[in-house]
Image (spheres, rainbow, N blue to C red):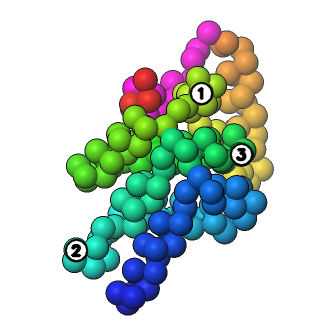
Amino acid sequence: MLKDEALLLHLILGKYNEHSATLVCTNQECLHLFIKALHASQEVYQGLNPFQITALGQITKPFFAALPEGKIQQRILGVLFDLLLNCKNLHCAQTISSVFKGISVDAEQISIELEPQPKVKTVATVHQTRRQKIQQQRKVQVPECVQEESMNWQRITLIL
């Protein structure tokens, strides 16, 4: 990536504000670019912040409140929690913490994040399908057994 391209991306990320928040909901490419920037943690050029830090800086209380759809807020919130959970950079963790201190989040949004993440399983053979049905029947027979394996306790603790 050329330095001019990196600067252009930083300028584009700088345009994410409360006035352009509706565009994030109407245009999936805008949302995809923003989320991709949130995951770009490597410094591209010396002296130039990573795209992640620039994108995190754009998540302000007015921007987050201006997002018209709760699904988009929920998605960005989920990305923030995942980033904080997997973050190894102190500067990034501090920036995410500052973002959380600056935005207003509903209790319903937090409760959605506390729910177990659905696992998507693809069954390839008839044998695997039968095994899966038998396992589901056993789970129904023993209802008091909590599915702890589907809970990400580290993420839940972080959120709380």
| Sequence-earlier tag: 2 or 3 | 2
Instruction: In the rendered structure, find residue 106 and report the number of the disc placed on it.
Output: 1
Residue 147 belongs to the span the image colors magenta: yes
Please, what is the three-letter code of the amino acid marked with disc 1? Asp
- Residue 139, percent from left and from top: 67, 21
Residue at point 39%, 88% (across, down): 4
Element on which disc 1 rests: loop
Residue 106 belongs to the span the image colors magenta: no
For the residue carrying disc 2, how many other residues have a C-alpha within 10 Å: few (<14), some (14-19), or many (20+)? few
Q: Quadrant of residue 130?
A: top right
Instruction: In the rendered structure, find residue 128 and report the number of the disc placed on it.
Output: none
- Residue 45, percent from left and from top: 27, 79
Q: CA distance from mark 3 to mark 1?
A: 14 Å
Total labels: the figure holds: 3
For the residue carrying disc 3, how many other residues have a C-alpha within 10 Å: few (<14), some (14-19), or many (20+)? some
* 139 displayed left or right of 40: right
Q: Which residues are magenta?
A: 144-157
- Residue 132, percent from left and from top: 70, 38
Query: Can you identify the residue that label 2 sits on?
Result: 47
- Residue 108, percent from left and from top: 63, 25
> Residue 66, can we see it?
yes
Please, what is the three-letter code of the amino acid marked with disc 2? Gly
Instruction: In the rendered structure, find residue 68 and report the number of the disc placed on it.
Output: 3
Residue at point 43%, 23% (across, down): 160
| Sequence-earlier tag: 2 or 1 | 2
Q: Quadrant of the N terminus?
A: bottom left
